[in-house]
Image (cartoon, helix red, strand yellow):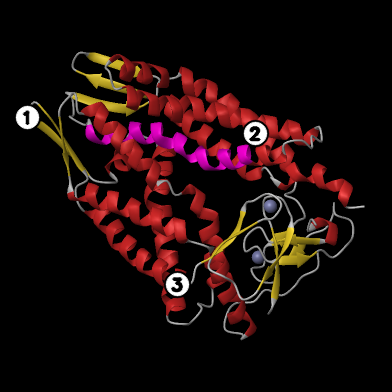
């Protein structure tokens, strides 16, 4: 493959990308939007980040998150305590939204990345890799851990005047998790993964899609 | 050269280039050979969906602001907070930065997003061809900022988890929080429904022939 035609998702402009690729960002000649980023070693780095993220995610959900003390009374909250209280108060929509955006979807994201990148790192492509990538793509906008962190900071400022806030182990793990995820997000580019999937499909090792007529 | 002018399109999921079967761009769909997704030259009914969802978000935004986000129960009674009263509380108590963050995330960002989406739909409908790059930037901005409006919903949840002293003091979510959640979800869906390629189409159409 010497040249490769890419279509810009923002403006539909076609551009020809000469091969071999050079490391860095490829921009759309018409609108300047990033077409893709070529970063040798992305899979290795991303794999390492998702292992770290999984550990931090489990720590975040297992250990105490925050404690609040007013006049000798104290409450201890875990990462998901709010979900439980909202559920008990029958605020089902809020409970589900909170659970999805801060627990289920971020976990699914990390878990899918591990399932994909583990084998890729060892030179194999999982049979259901295309399905996994599709799910990953669909859920990513709904993972809101970074927004939740800002919510935590605002709440601390709000409550600090009324009593004492005691940060738990999980809060530090959570803050580190956000840093790791932000870094992973900044290096993530789906194109090399899709290219590996295509190679796997050509060799018959990965699920293929028969071309159907519309 | 646009992909559509060469009867090509790119897969919305994996960005694979695909050929459309027929020459009639209104009624073609192709299937991506790599991931099996359906590919259309442009997102289907993009403007209608974007407009409908944006209008829905405006409808939800009114009760989100008027109804309380949370009820604070203490031995002295119950106090209800709306978004605006929360912002005013922070400003009055001197927490200007936090007041500003809440104002931007809960009031400024949703309104800005709705206005941008309405403007983009209008500009595409009227075939405006000027400032495509600037309008594209506005669109990318709505995609990035949309989720940050969830901050206030999260603040309410965390307050509920931490202020939980039985009969002494507790916090309950208000109906405003539910509407606010709907505003965030619906505006995010509205931004996803919009097809930014429509912004560029009028600027490129005359090159096609
Ligand atoms: Zn472009
Ligand atoms: Zn595809």
Vertical comparison of B20 with B209: above or below: below
Q: Is residue A200 left or right of residue A76?
A: right
Q: What's the residue at 36%, 23% (across, down)?
A: B99
Give x and y (percent) for residue A47: 39, 69
Q: Is residue B5 visible?
A: yes
SS at circle 1: loop
Q: Which residue is mark 1?
A: A72
The span shown in magenta is B137-162
- Neighbour tally class for label 1: few under 14, some 14-19, many 20 plus, Cα within 10 Å: few
Circle number at residue B21: none
SS at circle 3: loop
Q: Identify the main secondary structure in magenta.
A: helix
Give x and y (percent) for residue A41: 45, 72
Instruction: Let me know if marks 1 and 3 both belong to one chain.
Output: yes
Vertical comparison of B165 with A167: above or below: above
Vertical comparison of A106 with B175: above or below: below
Q: Which residue is mark 3?
A: A41
Q: Is residue B45 visible?
A: no
Vertical comparison of A123 with A114: above or below: below
Residue positioned most to the left:
A72
Q: What's the residue at 66%, 41% (across, down)?
A: B136
Instruction: Write down the quadrant of residue B171 in the picture.
Output: top left
Q: Which residue is mark 2?
A: B117
Q: What's the residue at 70%, 71% (across, down)?
A: A4
Instruction: Write down the quadrant of residue B117 in the picture.
Output: top right
Give x and y (percent) for residue B182: 51, 34
Separation (CA) of disc 3 from disc 2: 38 Å
- Neighbour tally class for label 2: few under 14, some 14-19, many 20 plus, Cα within 10 Å: many
- Neighbour tally class for label 3: few under 14, some 14-19, many 20 plus, Cα within 10 Å: few
Is residue B152 found inside the magenta-colored segment of the image? yes
- Residue depth check, mark 1 versus mark 3: number of the one nearer the observer: 3
The chain identifier of the residue carrying mark 2 reads B
């Amino acid at each position: 493959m010497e040249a490769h035609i890419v279509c810009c998702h923002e403006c539909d402009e076609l551009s020809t990308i000469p091969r071999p690729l050079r490391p860095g960002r490829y921009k759309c000649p018409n609108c300047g939007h990033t077409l893709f980023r070529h970063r040798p070693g992305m899979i290795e780095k991303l794999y390492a980040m998702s292992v770290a993220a999984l550990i931090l995610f489990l720590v975040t959900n297992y250990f105490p998150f925050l404690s609040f003390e007013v006049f000798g009374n104290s409450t201890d909250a875990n990462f998901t305590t709010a979900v439980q209280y909202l559920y008990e108060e029958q605020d089902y929509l809020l409970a589900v939204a909170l659970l999805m955006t801060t627990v289920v979807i971020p976990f699914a994201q990390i878990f899918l990345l591990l399932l994909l990148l583990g084998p890729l790192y060892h030179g194999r492509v999982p049979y259901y890799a295309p399905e996994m990538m599709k799910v990953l793509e669909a859920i990513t906008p709904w993972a809101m851990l970074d927004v939740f962190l800002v919510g935590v900071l605002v709440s601390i400022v709000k409550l600090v005047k009324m009593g004492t806030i005691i940060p738990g182990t999980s809060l530090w793990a959570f803050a580190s998790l956000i840093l790791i995820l932000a870094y992973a997000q900044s290096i993530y580019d789906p194109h090399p993964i899709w290219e590996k999937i295509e190679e796997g499909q050509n060799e018959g090792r990965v699920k293929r899609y028969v071309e159907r007529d519309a | 050269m646009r992909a559509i002018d060469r009867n090509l399109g790119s897969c919305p999921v994996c960005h694979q280039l695909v050929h459309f079967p027929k020459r009639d761009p209104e009624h073609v769909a192709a299937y991506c050979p790599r991931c099996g997704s359906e590919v259309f030259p442009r997102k289907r009914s993009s403007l209608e969906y974007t407009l409908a969802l944006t209008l829905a978000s405006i409808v939800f935004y009114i009760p989100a602001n008027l109804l309380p986000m949370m009820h604070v129960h203490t031995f002295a009674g119950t106090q209800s907070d709306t978004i605006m009263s929360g912002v005013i509380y922070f400003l009055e108590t001197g927490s200007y930065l936090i007041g500003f963050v809440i104002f931007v995330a809960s009031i400024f960002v949703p309104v800005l997003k709705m206005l941008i989406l309405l403007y983009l739909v209008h500009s595409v409908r009227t075939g405006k061809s000027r400032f495509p790059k600037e309008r594209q930037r506005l669109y990318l901005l709505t995609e990035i900022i949309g989720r940050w409006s969830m901050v206030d919903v999260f603040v309410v949840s965390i307050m509920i988890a931490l202020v939980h002293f039985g009969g002494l003091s507790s916090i309950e979510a208000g109906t405003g929080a539910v509407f606010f959640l709907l505003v965030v979800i619906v505006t995010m869906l509205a931004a996803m429904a919009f097809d930014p390629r429509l912004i560029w189409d009028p600027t490129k159409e005359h090159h096609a022939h």
